[in-house]
Amino acid sequence: MNQAFINILLIICLGYLLKRINILKEKDGAVISKIIFNITLPALVIVTFNSVKIEPSLILLPVIVIIFGLISAFLTFFVFKKEEKELKGTLLMLAPGANVGLFAYPIVHAMWGTEGLMYFGMFDVGTAIVIWVIGYILGSYFSEEGLTLKPVAILKKLGNSIPLMTYIVASILNYSHIQLPSTIIDVATTISKANMPLSLLLLGLYLNFTFDKKYFRPIMKFLTFRYGLGLLFGLALYFFLPFDQMFRYTLLIGLLLPVGMTALVFGIELKYRTTHLIAMIANITILISIVILYVFAIFIL
């Protein structure tokens, strides 16, 4: 297990090194992320959900994530209510979501294999809804132009999310005991093998150690709040929920994942002047979550 985690760190470092020596640039990450979200990740979801049985209890995972997202957004509003409008909107976009597809999937695959992917896949369904609905609405509300959303627009955004639609379709097929043709599974299996290395290289590519000092206080306050709240709820759910260990591991780790990179897309779309702050916080949370998972792998698994 430790060797697998070391391999993960080495691939992330490789991505960072390739950026430092100008073989790859950070802007190349946009293309790589499109390949991951639209091709390799959906392929991995198809293979995973085709080969395992989804227990009825797993339906509770996205429900718990959505409830936690609402609680997190509510508390974030009050913790940062004295901040200026755009900074408050930025932190509210970041607080409820998590980076499951890029960050968690490759690490979980290495640690728990297909079973872990199934659990985190269901966790990610809740995360997608939280990010695209709660995060986007709050970001729009606190933008300079104000709230201009329509329910149809939100549904359209959810419908355009290929990973989310893949989760839903794959879950329906699984519950209906419908097996996809072996040719499709074989092709998806081949494609899915690229998901882990591409995701880890992308994480390394996005790592950035520059720090804008004027944001030091709100960043430290946000990190303390986010990880403190995630740890508090994660431990409470781990010790008190009457479900299997993998279910509880998923919640404990899932609530300590980095912030979702989708907030950066929202920030650009909504004309926020704090997009560099979003990227900065995303980078810091990636490093913190890597340390948390490494400690978890050494002392718990």
Image (cartoon, helix red, strand yellow):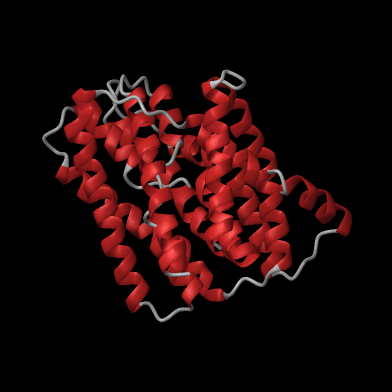
Is 39 on the left-hand or right-hand side of 82? right
Q: In the rendering, at what x and y percent does residue 66 appear?
A: 39, 56
* Placement of 52 over or under 98, stated as above or below: below
Is 20 on the left-hand or right-hand side of 109? left
Along the viewing direction, whichever of 32 and 82 lies nearer the viewer: 32
Q: Residue at x 70, y 43 (%)?
A: 194
Q: Residue at x 29, y 71 (%)?
A: 236
Q: Residue furthest left?
A: 82
Quadrant where the N terminus sits is bottom right
Residue 259 visible at all: no
Q: In the rendering, at what x and y percent does residue 172 appear?
A: 66, 62
The number of numbered badges drawn on the structure is 0
Q: In the rendering, at what x and y percent does residue 108 appear?
A: 55, 58
Along the viewing direction, whichever of 79 and 280 lies nearer the viewer: 280
Q: Residue at x 37, y 41 (%)?
A: 135
Q: In the rendering, at what x and y percent does residue 156 appear?
A: 54, 37
* Placement of 269 over or under 182, stated as above or below: above
* Placement of 94 over or under 236, stated as above or below: above
Q: Residue at x 51, y 22 (%)?
A: 20
Q: Residue furthest right?
A: 183
Residue 92 visible at all: yes
Q: Residue furthest bottom?
A: 242
